[in-house]
Image (tube, helix red, strand yellow):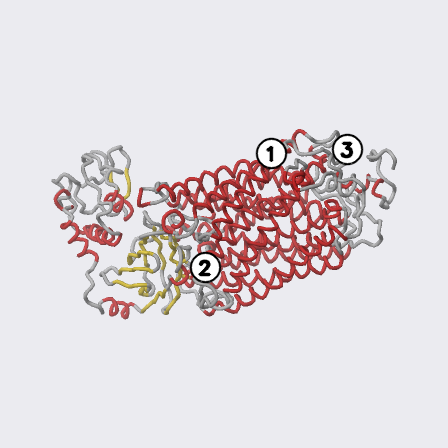
């Protein structure tokens, strides 16, 4: 879909049309008030220009009706703009369930991306058109930002946490992405290209290169190498909860609260295992801080996510009971 | 020229460096902020020259990153924040309220020395390694990864913050306790109201940035882990703490300029400010609500969606008092008797440019559009329209308006009008193309850029060269006028403030006799002492003559 004004980038995502429409609305509104005030000022400057050296202006204090009017009308318009913007944003921040997940790591001064089957890219992102894409993003050092003007999306990449963002590309093509949070010397060259392809082409591209281990297998290997498997027995009889089905579920904690086991929870459990203790278990897990890289954490996360389809043990998963009476 | 005044009352360098006269301290500040304006301007020139081509022909990446960082630090902390309050607030507030000096003259002098010491630390860092973190010092880049002189710069800004706090304290106490008889709250000039609101922000906000920079400095120097995730710290915590001050800081920069405009428009339209009470209340509203919007700088950090929605809502609220002021200034013109002296030209410039700057804030406060234009040149254009188009226009308009009071002499009017036009045109050519760049998607703080952005960068640099002329001209002719300009007399405009009811330049003690105020602000219809023609004669409240011989 072509953008309304030549300076706008192409509209290539599900968000772009709505964002541009809001932008145009704000533009029309601000233009109206800017022109109104400018015309009034210029008109007054001419009509009331001083005609003799000792002339004074009229004696006027103010007008309550005008004050209320020019307070309330801008307020109503402002709140309208706010509401429209908030709706777009909430939709943008809450990803749909059925996403194609790509893992992204930003570091000084490049982007490392990994497709679901393990294929890795540097400063490039290939995605299929008309699929919901979710980027799960971390940083190895400072704060960066992944910005795709044609999609109208942007999200910081913050060390120590994951940020996720989603979009649905709607048009095949190649679109610039930029690092959009100042990150040091080569901030300006830390960009690349998002290539949106037809699904068939994407599938062909995805399987094209061999030699990359897919993140789930890499994660499974790590899970054994790092001895996670010795406590986190799949059948739930070990020292630690089974991880079958835990991704996306609500976990019951020792203090009675529940938390949703998303990527951030998994990462925290690996690096700061004492932060949240699962109900019914002892705080005996050692921390892996300094022993695993961000990429390894992403691989472990991918593996744990893949355990969704295993049968969930009735006991020993730490998952919060759906109804009272079930343990 | 009067025989005796504050400039010739005593002579010698010690009488200046150890003065407690608020007017001399204002001039000490004028010299220092002008020096930092030149320094910040030099960095701006390097930025714009370098960005003429997309591939970085002039400076290395590291040098460019130092240029934009030090431009921001110099301009924000050492020019914009002190400028109007420390120069014009210091000079005028006692005069405007009928007092001999501020409440704490020695603390006033101390505030200047604190500023100078902080400035020296920062200057030292600029020439010894430079600073390349951005003026925003985001962590962990600034505390762990940067290879520049972060620690001395942070110490410099920390120290200078106390200059703000002391100034704000002095103003608040002075305005509360030292108004002349009859100078009630609602007879105060709006310049004083604006500085009252600014002082609240200075006192409540500045300690937060001091602590924040203190923590960042300690992290950098001693390897502590407040903001470093490798040590369990939170980089986003730094942003919250930093912006908790730095957002209200922008109101420290604009409220005084709005106060100047509220003096210029009534004076040069010879008409009371429309809606005085609403404009005064709007200043206070901006100061208060301004403390509640800081997270709008952080909409894409991945923070809570609900928090983002709340802060966007509050951001739209803070826009309203500025709109109210703009409408009141406009309404003041209707039925006025308008002249186009240079200060009024700056006021008109302010109206137009602040309008654009403020309205473009709506695009940024709205969550849906902010995602796209955050951290692009749209933001850069937005804040320069307000900081330069608003605050600096206010500063220059005020300098011209009060130059006859400060120096006893007039600047050359026609040259000044030409300079104002040059400035207005140069400014728009510099910064309007940057809105386009932002919409096109050019991120900020880029030392190289994709070639499709070049045309607007060239336009912007061309505009900057014109803008530079607009700045240099007043520096030259105002200096010339201070020594050789036409003698101004007590009230050349004439204007209605108390500062104009005493000689130009004023005596050290400001007034021979403490004035007694019986008239409202900007009340041209009740001031026969101004010698103007009021149809139907003056009102019943006659001004008490200050010298007993009018």
Chain containing mark 3: B
Tell me the tag on residue B63: 2
Is residue B48 toward the left or the right of residue B132 in the image? right
CA separation, marks 3 and 1? 28 Å
Question: Camera-side residue: B489 or B6?
Answer: B6
Is residue A226 toward the left or the right of residue A185 in the image? left
- Within 10 Å of disc 3 (Cα), the crowding (few <14, some 14-19, many 20+) is some
Question: Camera-side residue: A123 or B76?
Answer: B76
**Picture coordinates of residue A263 (x, y %)?**
27, 49
- In the rendered image, the quadrant that contains the N terminus of chain B is top right
Q: Are dots 1 and 2 on a single chain?
A: yes
Residue B475 seen in the current view: yes
Q: Which residue is mark 3?
A: B517
- Within 10 Å of disc 2 (Cα), the crowding (few <14, some 14-19, many 20+) is some
Point 45% across, 62% down: residue = B447
Q: Are dots 3 and 1 on a single chain?
A: yes
**Picture coordinates of residue A113 (x, y %)?**
29, 60
Point 20% across, 39% down: residue = A318
Foreground label between 2 and 3: 2
Q: Secondary structure at mark 3?
A: loop
Residue A14 seen in the current view: no
Point 34% across, 57% down: residue = A108
CA separation, marks 2 and 3? 57 Å
**Sequence-wise, which precedes: disc 1 or disc 2?**
2
**Picture coordinates of residue A88 (x, y %)?**
43, 53
- Within 10 Å of disc 1 (Cα), the crowding (few <14, some 14-19, many 20+) is some
Is residue B504 toward the left or the right of residue B254 in the image? right
């Amino acid at each position: 879909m072509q953008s309304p004004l030549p300076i706008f980038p192409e509209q290539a995502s599900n968000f772009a049309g709505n964002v541009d429409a809001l932008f145009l609305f704000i533009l029309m509104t601000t233009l109206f008030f800017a022109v109104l005030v400018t015309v009034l000022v210029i008109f007054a400057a001419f009509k009331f220009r001083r005609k003799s050296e000792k002339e004074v202006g009229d004696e006027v204090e103010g007008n309550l009706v005008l004050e209320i009017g020019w307070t309330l009308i801008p307020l109503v318009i402002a709140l309208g703009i706010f509401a429209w913007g908030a709706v777009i944003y909430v939709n943008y921040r809450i990803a749909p369930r059925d996403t194609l997940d790509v893992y992204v790591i930003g570091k000084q001064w490049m982007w490392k991306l990994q497709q679901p089957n393990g294929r890795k890219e540097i400063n490039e992102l290939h995605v299929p058109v008309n699929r919901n894409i979710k980027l799960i993003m971390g940083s190895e050092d400072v704060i960066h930002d992944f910005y795709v003007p044609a999609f109208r999306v942007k999200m910081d990449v913050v060390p120590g946490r994951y940020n996720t963002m989603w979009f649905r590309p709607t048009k095949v093509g190649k679109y610039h992405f930029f690092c959009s949070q100042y990150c040091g010397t080569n901030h300006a060259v830390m960009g690349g290209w998002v290539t949106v392809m037809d699904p068939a082409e994407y599938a062909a591209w995805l399987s094209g290169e061999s030699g990359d281990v897919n993140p789930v297998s890499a994660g499974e290997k790590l899970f054994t190498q790092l001895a996670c498997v010795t406590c986190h027995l799949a059948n739930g009889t070990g020292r630690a909860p089974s991880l079958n089905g835990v991704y996306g579920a609500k976990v019951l904690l020792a203090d009675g609260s529940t938390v949703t086991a998303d990527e951030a929870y998994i990462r925290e459990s690996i690096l700061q295992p004492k932060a949240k203790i699962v109900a019914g278990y002892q705080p005996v897990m050692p921390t892996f801080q300094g022993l695993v890289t961000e990429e390894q954490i992403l691989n472990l996360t991918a593996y744990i996510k893949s355990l969704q389809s295993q049968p969930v043990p009735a006991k020993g998963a730490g998952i919060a009971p759906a109804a009272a009476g079930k343990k | 020229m009067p025989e005796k005044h504050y400039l010739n009352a005593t002579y010698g360098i010690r009488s200046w460096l150890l003065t407690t006269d608020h007017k001399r301290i204002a001039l000490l500040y004028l010299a220092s902020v002008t020096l930092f304006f030149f320094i910040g301007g030099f960095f701006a020139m390097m930025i714009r020259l370098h960005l003429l081509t997309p591939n970085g022909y002039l400076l290395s990446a590291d040098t460019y990153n130092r240029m934009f960082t030090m431009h921001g630090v110099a301009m924000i902390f050492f020019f914009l924040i002190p400028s109007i309050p420390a120069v014009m607030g210091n000079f005028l507030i006692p005069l405007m309220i009928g007092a001999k000096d501020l409440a704490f003259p020695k603390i006033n002098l101390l505030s200047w020395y604190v500023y100078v010491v902080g400035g020296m630390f920062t200057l030292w860092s600029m020439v010894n390694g430079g600073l390349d973190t951005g003026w925003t010092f985001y962590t962990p880049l600034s505390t762990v990864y940067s290879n520049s002189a972060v620690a001395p710069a942070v110490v410099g800004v920390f120290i200078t913050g106390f200059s703000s706090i002391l100034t704000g304290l002095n103003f608040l106490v002075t305005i509360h306790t030292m108004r002349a008889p009859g100078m009630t709250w609602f007879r105060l000039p709006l310049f004083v109201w604006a500085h009252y609101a600014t002082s609240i922000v200075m006192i409540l906000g500045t300690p937060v940035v001091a602590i924040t920079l203190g923590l960042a400095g300690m992290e950098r120097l001693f390897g502590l882990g407040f903001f470093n995730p490798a040590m369990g710290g939170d980089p986003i915590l730094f942003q919250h703490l930093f912006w908790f001050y730095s957002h209200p800081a922008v109101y420290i920069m604009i409220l005084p300029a709005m106060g100047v405009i509220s003096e210029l428009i009534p004076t040069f339209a010879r008409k009371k400010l429309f809606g005085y009470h609403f404009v005064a209340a709007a200043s206070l509203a901006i100061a208060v609500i301004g403390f509640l919007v800081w997270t709008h700088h952080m909409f894409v950090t991945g923070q809570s969606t609900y928090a983002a929605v709340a802060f966007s809502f509050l951001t739209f609220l803070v826009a309203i008092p500025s709109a109210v002021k703009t409408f009141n200034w406009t309404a003041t013109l209707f039925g006025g008797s308008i002249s186009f002296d240079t200060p009024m030209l700056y006021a008109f410039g302010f109206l137009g440019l602040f309008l654009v700057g403020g309205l473009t804030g709506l695009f940024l406060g709205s969550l849906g559009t902010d995602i796209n234009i955050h951290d692009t040149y749209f933001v850069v254009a937005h804040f320069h329209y307000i900081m330069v188009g608003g605050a600096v226009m206010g500063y220059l308009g005020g300098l011209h308006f009060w130059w006859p009071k400060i120096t006893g002499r007039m600047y050359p009017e026609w040259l000044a009008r030409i300079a104002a036009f040059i400035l207005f045109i140069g400014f728009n050519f510099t910064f309007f193309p940057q809105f386009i760049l932002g919409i096109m998607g050019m991120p900020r703080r880029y030392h190289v850029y994709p070639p499709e952005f070049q045309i607007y960068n060239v336009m912007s640099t061309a505009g900057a060269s014109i803008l530079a002329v607009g700045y240099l001209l007043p520096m030259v002719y105002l200096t010339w006028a201070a020594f050789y300009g036409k003698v101004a007399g007590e009230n050349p405009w004439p204007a209605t403030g108390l500062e104009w009811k005493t000689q130009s330049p004023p005596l050290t003690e400001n007034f021979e006799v403490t004035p007694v105020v019986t008239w409202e602000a900007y009340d041209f219809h009740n001031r026969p002492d101004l010698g103007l023609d009021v149809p139907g004669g003056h009102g019943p409240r006659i001004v008490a003559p200050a010298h007993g011989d009018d």
